[in-house]
Amino acid sequence: MDVSLSPWLIGRKRPTSCFDRLTVAKPDRASRLHDEPPSPVGVAMKNPRRHGSRFRRFLHDVSTHTPFLQLIAILVGLWFIFSWGLYLAERGIAGTPITSLGQALYWGIAACSTAGIAEPPRSAMGLMLGSLWILVGSILFFGTIVATITTYFMRPMQRPVKKIIDTIEYNLEQLNDLTIEELDLLKNTVDTLITHVEQLKHKQQHKQLRRELPKT
């Protein structure tokens, strides 16, 4: 007989039904649940700050290191200018689909999307402005997407650290062609790099020890 369950069985009858068995096994089940470690899924759900910080970092990188905001500002500004000019060109013309500034703004979006849902203007000036906006707006719209994606994924290769590493690798491959002064400079650079790496390792070990001290 399990010793841990003996105090619960003193003065009780032998369990004859499923309800009695559940009653007797309840303390053991509770103790097992108390001793079980938390589920990794539950921990991940209780700590959503990591995902939020990654998303904020992504937005910060896109807004800071890519031309997304600048190109969007130019696109929106040209959209308002062309829409206003199209409204002025089509104002007072019979049968025109653009009778207000709001319809001109909608026409600019529909024409720039290349979906073919925008009716053509009626005046010659309106046709010229509309055609010019379709070309400029389409180039800016798709150019913004391509430029943002390209700049974001190419940014790690443009870091100064990457350039330093490429320079050191190139010099190591060309050791026979380097002068004494260049070799001394390369040696000093490598020594500085090694010292910096050792300092970083020491700081990481110190932080890890400080985290483990409260646990012990």
Image (cartoon, helix red, strand yellow):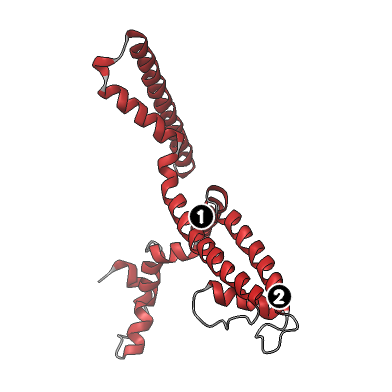
The disc at residue 78 is none
Residue type for callout 1: Phe
- Is residue 200 left or right of 141 when viewed as pictured? left
Residue type for callout 2: Ala
User: Quick one: label 1 or label 2, which is nearer the N terminus?
Assistant: 1
Q: Quadrant of the N terminus?
A: bottom left
Q: Quadrant of residue 106?
A: bottom right
Residue at the front extreme, as displayed: 124
Q: Please name which of the two marks, 1 or 2, marks the residue nearer to the observer.
A: 2
For mark 1, what is the residue? 58
Q: Residue drawn at (53%, 59%), measured in percent from left and top?
A: 52
- Is residue 65 left or right of 153 when viewed as pictured? right
Of 192 and 110, the residue lying toward us? 110
**Residue 8's x, y, as percent?**
37, 75
Q: Quadrant of the C terminus?
A: top left
- Crowdedness of circle 2 by 10 Å Cα count: few (<14), some, many (20+)? many
Callout 1: helix, strand or loop?
helix
- Crowdedness of circle 1 by 10 Å Cα count: few (<14), some, many (20+)? few
Q: Quadrant of residue 10?
A: bottom left
Of 169 and 187, the residue lying toward us? 169
Q: CA distance from mark 1 to mark 2?
A: 43 Å
- Is residue 170 left or right of 149 when viewed as pictured? left
The disc at residue 89 is 2
Of 161 and 130, the residue lying toward us? 130
**Residue 160's x, y, as percent?**
45, 34
Q: Quadrant of residue 171?
A: top left
**Residue 25's x, y, as percent?**
34, 77
Callout 2: helix, strand or loop?
helix
* Residue 72 visible within the image: yes
Disc 1, disc 2: CB below 8 Å?
no
